[in-house]
Image (cartoon, rainbow, N blue to C red):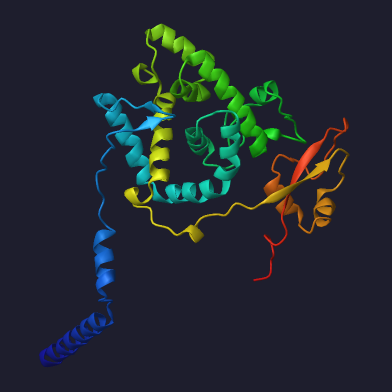
Amino acid sequence: MKRIKNALALVGLFGICGMFVFALQDAPTDENFEKKLINDYNVYALQVPSYLDFAGEQVPLHNPDILERMDRELLVNTYWQSNGFLMFKRARKYFPIIEPILAKHGIPDDFKYLAVIESGLTNARSHAGASGVWQIMKDTGREYGLEVNDNVDERYNIELATEVACEYLKKSKDKLGSWTLAASGYNAGMAGMARRLKEQDVSSYYDLLLGEETGRYVFRIIALKEILSHPDKYGFNFREKDLYGYIPTYKVEVDTVVTDFASFAKGFGINYKILKLHNPWLREPKLNNASRKKYLIDIPREGYYNTNP
């Protein structure tokens, strides 16, 4: 019996050795793979750039508190890689819409990154009711001329919402005195920021003691600006074809009731889903339009949604 057990053990040992040899023969030994395997599992501390600015206003990085807060946002947003890639992809699609509107209003181009941190460049809705790419509250939207109701909500119209954001930011800059404070005022409100500046007897965002959200707000914008402007520096590797493309559209004027947007869409060679993708401000499958208001509906140019491979 003992001999049988020893024999079985020997057979098992040979079997394991054989499997090990087979595994070694089958294992990838390509030099590039091994190099990648080693390098891809390292995490590095980031070096905060010696100079950063928002809208031309320098970040006082010589201040150790400011340096630590900036470092935090760079780390958080660099090593949240999946979210970072989505920001690169969406920026390629939506920045071409936002950038010329900012330029038209004389708003610094850096404010496009405010939209990134507000909504991730999606038509999000917050628990407080802020909606769209620019996260505009219902009352604010109406105050600045947007139509907001169950049938039409123009906060979801990226062009019109960007126009409103620009008007708000210009007013905020005039009231608070700097573009950095205007950005923080977008989060905390103009009146709220003015009150805090007065209470603490300071004139700079970087000298204010603020709550968690507003205290991180401008640093998050600057971090996204830095990362999206220098992908290679922060380890994001992609090709141009990996990014989402901007889909050109043309505008169709509508000043009547539309009873069925599914039928309406078919008239332009698309379906209701595609119509809604480009016009999320149309909140229902019909347009009431009792006042015969003039609306501009975006229709994608032919060939971009061809279902055939």
The quarter of the displayed image where residue 266 is located: bottom right
Q: Nearer the viewer, residue 135 or 107?
A: 107
Relative placement, left or right, of 118 versus 28 is: right
Relative placement, left or right, of 58 versus 15 is: right
Question: Could you say where residue 37 lies in the image, as x and y percent from the top left?
Answer: 27, 64
Question: Could you say where residue 105 lies in the image, as x and y percent from the top left?
Answer: 59, 28
Question: Could you say where residue 233 lies in the image, as x and y percent from the top left?
Answer: 32, 48
Residue shown at the point (47%, 23%) measured from the top left? 179
Q: Nearer the viewer, residue 184 or 248?
A: 248
Residue shown at the point (29%, 70%) measured from the top left? 33
Residue shown at the point (56%, 49%) measured from the top left? 93
Residue shown at the point (61%, 33%) measured from the top left? 162
Residue 281 seen in this snapshot: yes
Q: From the viewer's perspective, is residue 201 above or below residue 213?
A: above
The quarter of the displayed image where residue 7 is located: bottom left
Relative placement, left or right, of 15 versus 159 is: left
The quarter of the displayed image where residue 28 is located: bottom left
Q: Nearer the viewer, residue 240 or 269?
A: 240
